[in-house]
Image: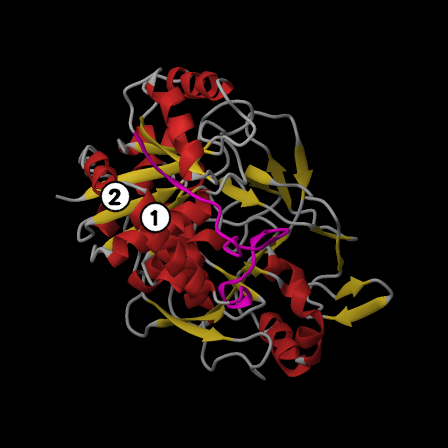
Amino acid sequence: MTSRILISACQSNSGKTTLTMGLIKAALLMGKEVCSFKSGPDYIDPLFHKEALRVPSYNLDLFLMGEDYVKDLLKKKTHQADMTFIEGAMGYYDGIGTGSQGSAWDLARTTKTPSILILAPKGLAASLGAMVKGYLTYKDPSMIKGFILNKVSPMMFSYYKKIIQELTDIPVLGFLPNIEDISLESRYLGLLGVDEIEDIEGKIDRLGRTLLETVDMEALFEIGRQAKDLEPGKSFSYKKPDGQVLKLGLAQDKALSFYYPDVLESLEEAGWGLEPFSILEDPALPEGISALYLGGGYPESYAEAISNNQSLLEDIKNKYQEGLPILAEGGGYMVLQESYREGEKTYPWIGLLPGEVQLTDRLQNFGYGSLSFEKDHLLGTRDKPIKSHEFHYSRLDREGEDILTQKPQSRKNWKSGQVGDHLFASYSHLHLASDPDLMDAFISRARQYKGEEDV
């Protein structure tokens, strides 16, 4: 029987990623076939699951993707796995605005997945009981079927376990003790890259082997077997171009690397051939591409290297002026600007758009949004809104005016981005695969660029 669980916590920075990766490693050491997911829009944690643990990993986001797509993706990707782990985002009940829509709990409820709640009880005594009782009764059903304690000693584990078991019959499955030099370093957008953390595989191996001794993994798997079968979701299909396969130039290196893997897979299903290139090293775009996709990332960390690759930057600008469709999100939107400023130093970038980028010390406009438009554009018409997510510390001195971002359940909105008949450029990140209209519009514009008759 297959097993599926969601790992969450009371708040951010409670050890969700560390524990999830350790549990995945422990399952792998037991010989299990594992698949993993991340709730919400975060790109970085799934990259860790994939690159450091060598397991397939995808996002499940009820706001961006919708319920049908989430169920469809989860069902499609887990049918051969012995064990599926879903890592929650933020606190367990934290969703859009002040509510729980789109939260880890909402995902567990929607997908009928049992949840394991991580508790970090340092500094608590009986108050831990109040916390547990609150989490179990805040929503009905809570979906919480077990607890794991983080950063406690064996002696304190027994103490805290007694407090919890006096209140509920939900099992305390084990604990993760303090382990020296095991923390996963972070920066302003999340964890450092896999290749930036020293001995990452060794750290995860230690985590997994520790959890095999301190967590009842068989009990964990048994809880996961309580997950209900998913009803068939809506079938997502896309137009496929007749004749020659479309080629998509895909910026993919240390500077730009944020893509949803199921979106790339769906692009291939829709008839695209993916042509990866490096904005840092390649002197020109791949030959014969039909469109260009510049995803998010950390271009500011490689500002000088990007600026030094002028032959590629000029090629992008020239190809765009010739009609090449460009989709640019987040970091990709940044590199389309004229320049990046760091202190007194300015680095020339592509210059397709007139802004200058600077990094700030706080989050700028961020969160989910609904995009509306001043005009028709690469991915659709002005009358069709698009769901998005935005998360960045940089800002532009000349922000685009073609897109209005409206935060859900809020009056807050802002103008951002620039669009045209062969351009979509914004700090906003999209999920193309869950909206076939976006995919079909992208294909149609690419075919027009290649001189093929549109259908």
Query: Would you call the spot at circle 1 few (<14 residues within 10 Å), some (14-19), or many (20 or more)?
Result: many
* Front-lying residue, 175 or 363: 175
First in sequence: mark 2 or mark 1? 1
Real-space Cα distance between discs 2 and 1? 8 Å
Q: Which residue is mark 1?
A: 211
**Marks 2 and 1 in Cβ contact (< 8 Å):** yes
Q: Which residues are magenta?
A: 172-198
In which quadrant will I find the N terminus?
Answer: top left
For the point 27% across and 51% down, the residue is: 237
Can residue 252 be seen in this snapshot? yes
Query: What element does badge 2 sit on?
Result: helix
Q: Which residue is mark 2?
A: 217
* Front-lying residue, 50 or 74: 50
- Image location of residue 336, percent across then percent down: 66, 64
- Image location of residue 291, percent across then percent down: 48, 68
Can residue 436 be seen in this snapshot? no
- Image location of residue 406, percent across then percent down: 60, 34
Looking at the rendered structure, the number of numbered marks drawn on it comes to 2
| Residue 235 in the image: above or below residue 412 | below
Q: Amino acid at mark 1?
A: Leu
* Front-lying residue, 418 or 104: 104
Q: Amino acid at mark 2?
A: Met
Q: Residue lying furthest front in this view?
A: 155
In the displayed structure, does residue 126 sit left or right of residue 455? Answer: right
In the displayed structure, does residue 146 sit left or right of residue 45? Answer: left
Query: Would you call the spot at circle 2 few (<14 residues within 10 Å), some (14-19), or many (20 or more)?
Result: some
| Residue 70 in the image: above or below residue 129 | below
Q: Residue lying furthest left in this view?
A: 1
Query: What element does badge 1 sit on?
Result: helix
